[in-house]
Amino acid sequence: MSKQATVIVECSSESTDELRDSVRRQLTNDVESFLKGGGRVQAIADNVRADPPKKPSMTYGSAPI
């Protein structure tokens, strides 16, 4: 199965309606082809994070004067 690079245009709040529609169509087509190729969509719970919080480090006052 070969992977194909896809260029995605960025949209902002100032983007034109035509650009937004184009990006929306591209995203829809990409999702449809992913699903047709056997891909699955997995729902992730809202409280799951990719980068869990880290324990704070106590470095205050450790530098020499």
Image: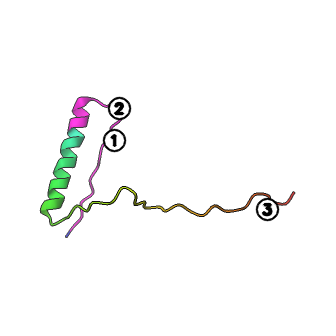
Q: Residue at x 15, y 54 (%)?
A: 32
Residue type, label 3: Ser
The quadrant holding residue 59 is bottom right
Q: CA distance from mark 1 to mark 2?
A: 10 Å
What stretch of residues is rendered in magenta?
2-21
Tell me which secondary structure the magenta stretch mostly adopts: loop
Image location of residue 40, percent across then percent down: 20, 64
Residue 4 inside the magenta-drawn segment: yes
Q: Mark 3 or mark 2: name the one nearer the start of the chain.
A: 2
- Image check: 49 left or right of 65? left
Q: Residue furthest bottom?
A: 1
Label 3 belongs to which residue?
62
Label 2 belongs to which residue?
13
Location of the C terminus by quadrant is: bottom right
Image location of residue 16, percent across then percent down: 27, 29
Q: Secondary structure at mark 1?
A: loop
Q: Secondary structure at mark 3?
A: loop
Q: Nearer the viewer, residue 40 or 20?
A: 40
Q: How is the image coloured?
A: rainbow
Judge depth for marks 1 and 3 and give the one in front: 3
Q: Residue furthest right?
A: 65
Q: Nearer the viewer, residue 40 or 36?
A: 40
Residue 51 inside the magenta-drawn segment: no
Tag shown at residue 26: none
The quadrant holding residue 10 is top left
Image location of residue 53, percent across then percent down: 53, 60
Structural crowding at the residue carrying mark 1, measured as other residues with C-alpha within 10 Å and reported as few (<14), some (14–19) or many (≥20) = few
Q: CA distance from mark 3 to mark 2?
A: 45 Å
Residue type, label 2: Ser
Label 1 belongs to which residue?
10
